Amino acid sequence: MPHIQADSGGSSAIVYPVEHMRTVAAQILATASLAQSNHDAQWQQVLNYINNNFDPTMHATLLACLKPYADQVRESYDWQISLATALFDTVNQIDRNEQGTQQSFGFTHGPAQS
């Protein structure tokens, strides 16, 4: 959450915890990507087991039961990866807005020169 920060001169600014947001996004992305990779490997093992151990006439029935669940699990990881990407995009936009605001006010260091 952004918060309002006041300085000693009495002015205030809205501050977004961009470094924390980046850290959280990176954690979500790493965790979800690893989990999705593990899920894909385990799903492939399930498919191999079905193909190698069940009568071919049973394959469609088994897949009809299992595939919707596997698809939902994978979609949940896709959603988490999308969330992390959106969080990274938000942080980047905050940075661009901050830079643009500073440039539009023409902030300089030191006294103005005539």
Image: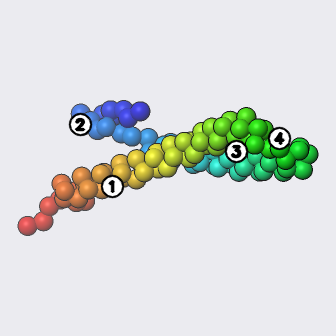
Q: Earlier in the sequence, mark 3 or mark 2?
A: 2
Task: Work out how far the residue at label 4 is from the one at label 1, CA to CA, in angstroms.
Answer: 56 Å
Q: Nearer the viewer, mark 4 or mark 1?
A: 4
- Residue 66 in sight: no
Proximity of marks 4 and 3: CB atoms separated by less than 8 Å: no
Q: Quadrant of residue 113?
A: bottom left
Task: Work out how far the residue at label 2 is from the one at label 1, CA to CA, in angstroms.
Answer: 22 Å
Q: Disc count in the image?
A: 4
Is 16 on the left or on the right of 113, as rendered? Answer: right
Task: Work out how far the residue at label 4 is from the one at label 3, CA to CA, in angstroms.
Answer: 29 Å
Task: Work out how far the residue at label 3 is from the one at label 1, CA to CA, in angstroms.
Answer: 32 Å
In the foreground, 23 or 112 = 23
Q: Earlier in the sequence, mark 4 or mark 3?
A: 3
Q: What amino acid is labelled 1 in the image? A: Arg
Q: Residue at x 24, y 33 (%)?
A: 10
Q: Which residue is mark 1?
A: 96
- Residue 61 in sight: yes
Please provide percent x and percent y for residue 95: 36, 52
Q: Which residue is mark 3?
A: 35
Is 78 on the left or on the right of 100, as rendered? Answer: right
Task: Work out how far the residue at label 2 is from the one at label 4, CA to CA, in angstroms.
Answer: 71 Å
Q: Earlier in the sequence, mark 4 or mark 1?
A: 4
